[in-house]
Amino acid sequence: MTDEQADLVTWARNTARRNNQIVTETVDQVQQGMPGRAPERERITAARHVHNHAGDVLADAVLDARGAGETWHEIGVTMEMGTAEDGTPPGPQAFEWSLGRTKLTSAYWTCRTCENVVADDGPYEANPAMVEHGHTRDCSRAARDAEQYRQMLAEAGMD
């Protein structure tokens, strides 16, 4: 992680801590507009709405990161997903998390290189051409990823 990235992470964590009070105030404000329930239940409902919105923001950020070229593994690590007890690495966990929010079988994001919407079938196949559908024929990102895959095969003696 570069110093700039570390500074951004520190800034985000500090901002989140400061915003904890803002979130609490938001929950309290939402709670006030919900008649007919016990205050504890109103607070739970209001907090759930704030939590769901935060999850939507995170889901958008995940797909934006894929569009920018981040791998599922990098996204999973950034989401602080370690290897699960069943041995599932961070990449598949991040992919499954993104699907769980949408109930789809592919994640859809816009490639920042070719500007096309790409259907992403996840980090289960090493060949990007088999899992990323929708790049333009002249997309330099898709070409770079295909070349990296060919180099990996050559290094493994599988070309």
Image: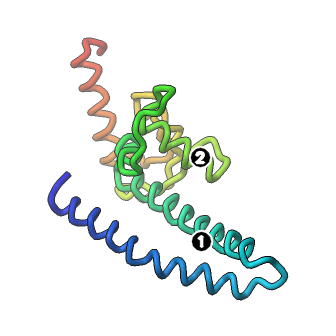
Label 2 or label 1, whichever lies nearer to me, is: 1
From this view, report whether residue 16 is shown above or below residue 133.
Answer: below
Label 1: few (<14), some (14–19) or many (≥20) C-alpha neighbours in 10 Å: some
Label 2: few (<14), some (14–19) or many (≥20) C-alpha neighbours in 10 Å: some
Which residue shows up at 29% across the image and 26% down it? 150
Query: Quick one: 89 or 128, which is closer to the camera?
Result: 89
The residues tagged by marks 2 and 1 sit, at their Cα atoms, a distance apart of 21 Å
Which residue shows up at 25% across the image and 12% down it? 157
Residue 138 in sight in this render: no
Residue 69: x, y in percent?
Answer: 34, 50
Q: Quadrant of residue 114?
A: bottom left
Q: Amino acid at mark 1?
A: Val
Q: Amino acid at mark 2?
A: Leu
Query: Quick one: 92 or 132, which is closer to the camera?
Result: 92
Q: Earlier in the sequence, mark 2 or mark 1?
A: 1
From this view, report whether residue 23 is shown above or below residue 109.
Answer: below
Residue 60: x, y in percent?
Answer: 50, 61
- SS at circle 2: helix
- Say whether residue 132 is left or right of residue 46: left
From this view, report whether residue 102 is shown above or below residue 27.
Answer: above
- Say whether residue 147 is left or right of residue 90: left
Query: Quick one: 53 or 84, which is closer to the camera?
Result: 84
From this view, report whether residue 29 is shown above or below residue 133.
Answer: below
Location of mark 1 (residue) = 50
Q: Which mark is residue 104?
A: none
Q: Which mark is residue 99?
A: 2
Count of residue discs: 2
Query: Quick one: which residue is furthest to the top in this view?
Result: 157
Q: Quadrant of residue 52?
A: bottom right
Residue 99: x, y in percent?
Answer: 59, 46
